[in-house]
Image (cartoon, grey):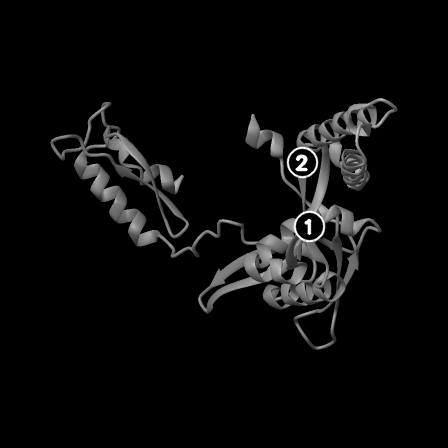
């Protein structure tokens, strides 16, 4: 509602979205004469508009900048052990400042709130890296076997040609020298044919190591990249919050739930067909 009340379109002007530091507003589009482009009758007069903006300014609160990836990291990965719902970050503000608490969606008032989400995230990162940090990051690519099929066909046709030429009365049996040369060439081509992997002649998916590890991938992409990897691999983390006597903040215990085929799931599967078509 605030964004709508601050939108200059209410004056009848053409506007476009203006994002600055995560804050979404609308700004006026000037015409060729550098004046606002009028496209409709105004909802407010200039005086009413100025008064409205002044009132909004006087009552407005400085909101924290919107984070493109959302306020909650590892959304869909961290689950409350009691209610099995997502663990999320809840922001609250009072006269003393702005506070963030890690809570869950399913329990009344979010259950026991933990006041330092960053510490929980870092603990989760360290647990994941201790288990998967040295695993290589692999990418699935679609390989076409057309070139190898052509090479196999060429070798087979050449081998058949030389075998026919080495038959009694064939063109390579006329002299000892031509026969020896043909037999040597035939032996070499047979070795080349045997060296071709039959699987390489098929159109297939192949897995290519990118030269880095899961730990390096996290360092390059940050927590957001790790969260995507965990979601793709089906890895979840059970969050247990335990009440500590005489303390407001609970004790937090994390338990990773890792599928048996996690290394296969972690393979980055690019959609090569979408890129082509």
Which residue does the image show at 37% across and 41% down from the upper left?
3
**Position of 100 relative to 3 (above/below):** below
Whether residue 247 is visible here, answered yes or no, is: yes
Of the numbered discs in the image, which one, if any, rests on residue 40? none
Q: Secondary structure at mark 2?
A: strand
Q: Which residue is painted at 77% across and 47% down in the image? A: 264
Give the secondary structure at mark 1.
strand
Residue sticking out furthest to the right:
168
Q: Residue furthest left?
A: 33
Left or right, residue 66 beside residue 31: right
Residue at the front extreme, as displayed: 175
Q: CA distance from mark 2 to mark 1?
A: 13 Å
Numbered-mark total: 2
From the top left corner, tell me how far across and down residue 105 is, in percent.
67, 49
Between residues 206 and 244, which one lies in front from this camera angle? Answer: 206
In the image, residue 73 lies at what x, y percent? 60, 55
Q: Residues within 10 Å of mark 2 (few under 14, many from 20)?
A: some
Q: Quadrant of residue 277?
A: top right
> Where is residue 60 shown, x and y percent of the image?
35, 52
Evaluate if marks 2 and 1 touch, with contact meaning CB atoms under 8 Å apart: no
Is residue 77 rendered to the left or right of residue 187?
left
Q: Residues within 10 Å of mark 1 (few under 14, many from 20)?
A: many
Q: Is residue 74 visible?
A: no
The N terminus sits in image quarter: top left
Q: Position of residue 254 (x, y in %)?
A: 75, 63
Q: What's the mark number on residue 138?
A: 1
Residue situated in front as seen by the camera: 167 or 5: 167
Residue matched to label 2: 142
Give the residue displayed 48% in from the left and 52% down from the top: 67
Where on the picture, by quarter, is residue 201?
top right
Q: Is residue 118 left or right of residue 54?
A: right
């Amino acid at each position: 509602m605030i964004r709508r009340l601050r939108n200059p379109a209410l004056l009848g002007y053409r506007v476009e979205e203006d994002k600055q530091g995560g804050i979404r507003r609308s700004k006026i589009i000037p015409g060729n004469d550098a004046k606002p482009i009028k496209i409709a009758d105004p909802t407010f007069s200039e005086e009413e508009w100025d008064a409205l903006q002044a009132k909004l300014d006087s009552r407005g609160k400085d909101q924290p900048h919107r984070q493109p990836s959302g306020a909650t990291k590892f959304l869909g990965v961290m689950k409350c052990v009691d209610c099995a719902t997502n663990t999320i970050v809840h922001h609250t503000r009072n006269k003393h400042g702005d506070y963030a608490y890690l809570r869950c969606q399913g329990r009344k008032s979010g259950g026991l709130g933990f006041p330092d989400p960053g510490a929980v995230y870092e603990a989760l990162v360290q647990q994941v890296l201790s288990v998967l940090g040295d695993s290589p990051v692999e990418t699935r690519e679609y390989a076409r076997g057309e070139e190898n099929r052509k090479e196999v066909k060429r070798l087979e046709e050449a081998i058949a040609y030389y075998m026919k030429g080495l038959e009694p009365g064939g063109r390579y049996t006329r002299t000892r020298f031509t026969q020896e040369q043909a037999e040597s060439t035939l032996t070499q081509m047979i070795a080349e044919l045997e060296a071709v992997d039959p699987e390489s002649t098929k159109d297939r998916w192949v897995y290519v190591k990118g030269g880095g590890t899961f730990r390096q991938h996290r360092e390059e992409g940050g927590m957001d990249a790790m969260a995507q990897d965990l979601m793709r691999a089906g890895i979840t983390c059970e969050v247990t919050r335990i009440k500590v006597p005489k303390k407001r903040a609970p004790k937090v215990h994390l338990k990773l739930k890792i599928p048996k085929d996690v290394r296969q799931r972690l393979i980055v599967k690019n959609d090569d067909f979408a890129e082509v078509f």
